[in-house]
């Protein structure tokens, strides 16, 4: 999201990281469900400590219900967040499906290199390499926001796309210009940013949130930049484009446009939720994912 850009880090640099703050903070309610950022869910326990070594980094991931039959569902979170934001969704989906949660490079418990320039292609390659190393030859991708852009990048890579059986692209975008310019003025954005900084300091005490955030901001201010012709190359028969009817981060016309240019894709609009639908209504989000399986 381009409007996150460097305004992110003016605020981030003012945050105090020296205070001890619980990882899963309480939520603040502001009227309607779509105006609320619930507390960050907890990941199902126990939380894995294993990581995957990739290009000088250590990528955190965790498998759930590996005994279940069916194609694994890979959950790819949004910018500045990490897999716990999918925590309630994981709990629901993993009752009947194998699920894999991945913290993208630099996010959550995953590290990054000082000279890394984040791209969605990089995140796509990271995810693919991790899955291949774990013997996962095919998967359902569920991407949220930057994770949705990572999913689109994966679908545009013919090698990776051949391993994706279904894709659920929530709050995705084809250009950094698809961002709602007023997002950074919202209370929910300010709350999310502050919470992200606190969580990052807990998950990676030796890391620098402002440096990490600047890399994310640079990414979101410059990428993606896919044309309609680019997206038309995607096999839409396995793609569901999902949007939120109160998305404050991505322009509301974007989901329908993505679906129109990715021929054969389906379009689903989640009701009474915003960009943060997976934490605002995990039950409805999980049901929408299960509907494509």
Image (tube, grey):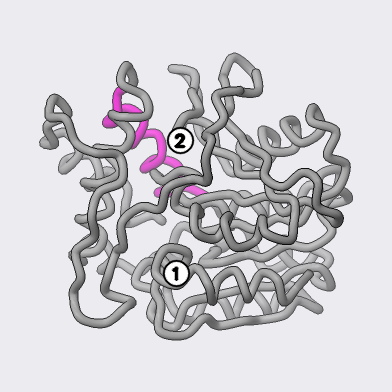
Q: Quadrant of the C terminus?
A: bottom right
Q: Which corner quadrant of the image does residue 100 belong to?
A: top right
Q: Are marks 1 and 2 in contact (CB under 8 Å)?
A: no
Label number found at residue 107: 2
Compared with 253, 191 (above or below) is above
Q: Residue at x 54, y 76 (%)?
A: 284
Compared with 20, 158 (above or below) is below
Q: Where's residue 202, x and y in %?
A: 30, 29
Give the left or right position of residue 98, taking residue 114 as reference.
right
Comparing 194 with 48, the one in front is 48
- For disc 1, the neighbor class at 10 Å (few under 14, some 14 to 19, many from 20) is many
Q: Which secondary structure is most common in the magenta stretch?
A: helix
Q: Which corner quadrant of the image does residue 233 belong to?
A: bottom right
Q: Where's residue 55, x and y in %?
A: 64, 18
- For disc 2, the neighbor class at 10 Å (few under 14, some 14 to 19, many from 20) is many
Q: Which contiguous range is marked in magenta?
A: 208-223
Q: CA distance from mark 1 to mark 2?
A: 20 Å
Q: Where's residue 18, x and y in %?
A: 13, 25
Secondary structure of the residue carrying numbered label 1: helix
Comparing 197 with 263, the one in front is 197
Is residue 211 covered in magenta? yes
**How many numbered marks appear?**
2
Secondary structure of the residue carrying numbered label 2: loop
Q: Where's residue 187, x and y in %?
A: 18, 64
Give the left or right position of residue 56, taking residue 130 as reference.
left
Q: Residue at x 52, y 81 (%)?
A: 270
Comparing 39 with 16, the one in front is 39
Q: Residue at x 50, y 28 (%)?
A: 110
Q: Residue at x 31, y 56 (%)?
A: 39
Label number found at residue 277: 1
Compared with 193, 212 (above or below) is above
């Amino acid at each position: 999201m381009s409007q996150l850009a460097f305004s992110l880090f003016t605020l981030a640099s003012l945050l105090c990281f020296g205070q001890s703050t619980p990882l899963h903070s309480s939520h603040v309610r502001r009227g309607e469900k779509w105006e609320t950022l619930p507390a960050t869910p907890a990941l199902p326990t126990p939380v894995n400590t294993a990581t995957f070594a990739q290009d000088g980094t250590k990528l955190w991931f965790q498998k759930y219900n590996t005994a279940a039959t069916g194609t694994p569902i890979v959950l790819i979170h949004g910018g500045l967040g990490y897999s716990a934001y999918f925590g309630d969704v994981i709990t629901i989906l993993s009752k009947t499906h194998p699920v894999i949660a991945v913290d993208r490079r630099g996010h959550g418990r995953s590290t990054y290199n000082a000279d890394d320039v984040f791209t969605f292609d990089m995140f796509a390659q990271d995810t693919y390499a991790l899955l291949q190393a774990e013997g996962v030859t095919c998967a359902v991708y569920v991407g949220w926001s930057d994770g949705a852009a990572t999913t689109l990048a994966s679908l545009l890579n013919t090698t990776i796309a051949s391993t994706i059986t279904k894709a659920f692209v929530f709050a995705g975008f084809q250009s950094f210009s698809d961002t709602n310019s007023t997002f950074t003025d919202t209370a929910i954005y300010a709350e999310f940013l502050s919470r992200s900084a606190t969580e990052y300091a807990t998950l990676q005490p030796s890391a620098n949130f402002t440096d990490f955030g600047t890399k994310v901001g640079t990414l979101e201010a410059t990428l993606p930049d896919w044309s309609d012709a680019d997206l038309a190359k995607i096999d839409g028969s396995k793609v569901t484009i999902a949007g939120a009817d109160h998305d404050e981060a991505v322009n509301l016309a974007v989901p329908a446009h993505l679906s129109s240019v990715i021929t054969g894709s389906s379009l689903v609009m989640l009701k009474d939720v915003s960009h943060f639908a997976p934490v605002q209504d995990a039950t409805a989000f999980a049901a929408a994912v299960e509907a494509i399986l």
